[in-house]
Image (cartoon, rainbow, N blue to C red):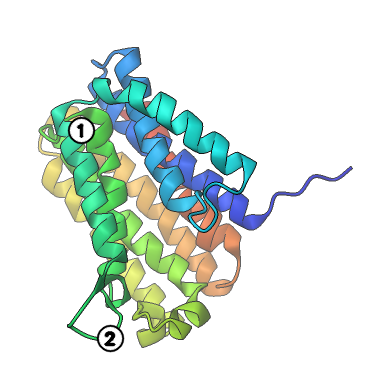
Amino acid sequence: MKWTIHSSVLIKFLFILATISLVGVGQFLVQQTTLTHALATQYIAFLGTWILYVFDWRAPFKKGGQRVFILQALILGLLALPFITFFQWYVIGFIAFLSIIYQVKIPYVKVQFQFKKRLLVKNILIGLSWAALIPLGAGHLSTTAIQFLFWFMAVQVSYGSVIRDITDIAHDQKHQFQTLPIIFGVSKTIRILQLVNWSSFLLACYFANESSLQWIYVVAFLVICYKSLLLYKVKQNQSAKLWTQYLNISTCMLIFVLTYLLS
């Protein structure tokens, strides 16, 4: 019997794995958190990702899996809350605020005006939201390594979401989204993204000002090379989900592996 995984299921699984990886990056760099605190933080982040990307709000109580999720979220979520620090609550609030901005429709401004439909606004909000998972895991944003990874991932995820826009051109045009692929076309968008990708190395140059932080250069260079290859493959075949979705989302896991091996 041949087992197949539906594309949407795999993408949702990769989103959850990406969440665990970015929170794990922050936790690994701190290495002072207790196991209970670490698990509580991971669960809260997992819970938020599940609600945003997996949970079906159209039928929250009609499916068995939905009901099970709600029950365990209430039980485990309440148990995890006391272990979250004030700073982590601040980060969770920041991510929630960005999510609200992403979704909300502004009345009296323009018919069905949404920030996420404006050029690059959606991509920046997504980048900042995912990058915030790193200080969420670390419990602070005070060290140079955490600051670098936050801003570096904000850039990487932001233009990574533009790569995903390339496969959604028809959908975005139908819903009146302003995206780089719609405005500039795929070829010019990829050239712009390559420029942004290699320019992000400047962040490593800015933050790696101590001998103990030289690993930042290697992490940045390897991730940039990885994304550069992705962009090259997307240019060859813009409909291939392997490049635009699966390996694109996997950048978060790559960051975790490289940070673990090199820091």
Classify the position of the N terminus by image quarter: top right
Residue pictured at 25% horizontal, 48% vertical = 95
Residue 16 is situated, as x and y percent measured from the top left of the image, at 47, 42
Q: Which residue is mark 2?
A: 111
The vertical placement of 27 against 68, above or below, is above
Of 151 and 62, the residue lying toward us: 62
Q: Amino acid at mark 2?
A: Val
Counting residues from the N terminus, which is met first, the one under dot 2 or under dot 1?
1
Q: Which element type, helix, strand or loop, lies under badge 1?
A: helix
Residue pictured at 24% horizontal, 25% vertical = 84
Q: Is residue 61 left or right of residue 189?
A: right
Of 31 and 137, the residue lying toward us: 137
Q: Does residue 60 appear anywhere in the picture? A: yes
Please name which of the two marks, 2 or 1, marks the residue nearer to the observer: 2
Instruction: Categorize mark 1 by other alpha carbons within 10 Å: few (<14), some (14-19), many (20+).
Output: many
Number of marks drawn: 2
Q: Which residue is mark 1?
A: 88
Classify the position of the C terminus by image quarter: top left
Q: Are marks 2 and 1 in contact (CB under 8 Å)?
A: no
Instruction: Categorize mark 2 by other alpha carbons within 10 Å: few (<14), some (14-19), many (20+).
Output: few
Marks 2 and 1, how far apart at CA: 36 Å
Residue 67 is situated, as x and y percent measured from the top left of the image, at 55, 39
Residue pictured at 37% horizontal, 42% vertical = 48
Residue 102 is situated, as x and y percent measured from the top left of the image, at 29, 63
Q: Amino acid at mark 1?
A: Gln
